Amino acid sequence: MLMSVLITALAPAFMTPPDSSSWPMHGGDAARSHVADVAPPINPVQAWVRDVGSSPAWPGPARRDAYNKVEDLKSRLRFDDAPQPTIVDGVVIVGSSRDDTVNAIDIETGTELWTFWTEGPVRFAPAIHGDLVLVGSDDGHLYALDRRTGQEQWRQRPGPLDRRVAGNGRIVSAWPIRTGPVIMDGSVYTTAGIFPPEGVWVAAYDVSTGEPQWSVRHTDLPAQGYLVGSPDRLYVPASRDRPIMLDRKDGSRIGQLDGQGGTWVLLTGDGVVYGPGKQGRMSDQEPGGDELATFQGLRMVVADGRSYLLDADSLSALDRDRYRSLAVRRRAVRAERKALDEAIKAGDTQANARAEAIAGELDAIAQEMRECLLWRVTAHHPHALLLAGGVLVAGGDDEVAAHSMRDGSLLWTRPVHGAAKGLAVIDGALLVSTDTGAVHCFREGADLQ
């Protein structure tokens, strides 16, 4: 996956890890950080597994782009391959794109507590706020449900009409909700619509009452993916295009990220990672859009000045703080070299000596940047990555694996049914969901099946 990293001035408060008993939004928080303070079970045993179903909206990409001579294309629209669980007070809340439902499951026993039926596929993880579950559907509505009973508390339709059409093999709204809701400061943010000529709405509501706060229509934003929130910005994935940045207080547009697009977005303490683009590469950029560095990778988590990178066959750790400092220095030296090259072309012979010195500086910086790689290990689990306590959990085909954060050493592997593309953790339990629609619960202790 191609992911871009745009470095912005973001306060760390929005990245507060969930408490040990909850995983209230996809990724754990509004930043979609996939970082938790609690570790997964040391010796996990499957307690239960439930099939809630999965029916993705879009097929995979073509194998190659012959016109642009690009091979091994990565899908930029696989946002709903697996049902993504959220957790609070011992209850797992998960949607189904196959059955058009929202389901509550007891985390101890795996028994169903309640089911709520919408009128279209539920493609994104519900978000939990107090006693409410917020969830969007392809039927064009954002629902607020009572967390304990599943009873509807309020609903809103961000789109202009309740008109249904055939789409992705189903009957859905002409303005389906194809973004995962994000909740911040008493507001819930959502979108409606994926076809820009028809209009795509981004809207904010009071999370408790459903009262509208603002709504903005766009004609160039095919909104699909998980919304991400920072203290002052809302990041809206734009399908294959680059995510859009909006002002959270009124929805006004701030700009668009650089690089290549995709539906996967992650905020760090000082940047935003997004993708997948056409191929597996990450791009690290400054606020003005200037690229600092590129990395191969499919998933990434960031914690304590380190980046943990997952690609098709390896897992690695990078000294992110040092690397970024060197990247800024390298860019300044490259800019000076470019100016010297122009001077030399203009006949300035005195610039030659400095140009030779700069070549040596760039070689030295490149060597230091290579030394920022702390470790790399073989790992064939490219679908999902979670940092829980001191453990990196990675999802692969028919298997989930845990690695030490310290050196990448393999701690354990466990079998699952299908490609493990969803991960969530609380104290005492690890949830793994797959592209077959299965949700597995692993806990410490005896097998409860």
Image (tube, helix red, strand yellow):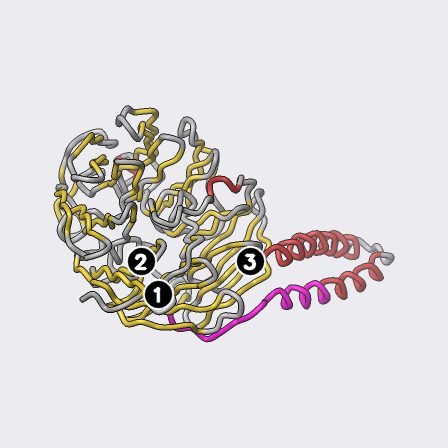
Q: Is residue 380 magenta?
A: yes
Q: Residue at x 82, y 55 (%)?
A: 347
Quadrant the N terminus occupies: bottom left
Q: Position of residue 282 (x, y in %)?
A: 49, 58
Question: What is the span of residues highlighted in magenta in the rendered image?
Answer: 363-382
Residue picked out by circle 1: 395
Residue picked out by circle 3: 306
Do callouts 2 and 1 mark residues in contact (Cβ within 8 Å)? Answer: yes
Question: Which type of secondary structure does the marked residue at label 2 adopt?
Answer: strand
Establish if 47 lies above or below 236: below
Q: Position of residue 96 (x, y in %)?
A: 19, 51
Q: Position of residue 336 (x, y in %)?
A: 74, 53
User: At label 1, which amino acid type do we have?
Assistant: Gly
Left or right for 307, reference 97: right
- Please tell me which of labels 1 and 3 falls first in the chain: 3
User: At label 2, which amino acid type do we have?
Assistant: Gly
Question: Which type of secondary structure does the marked residue at label 1 adopt?
Answer: strand
CA distance for labels 2 and 1 = 8 Å
Quadrant the C terminus occupies: bottom left
CA distance for labels 2 and 3 = 23 Å
The answer to whether any part of residue 241 appears in the image is no
Q: Residue 422 got which mark?
A: 2
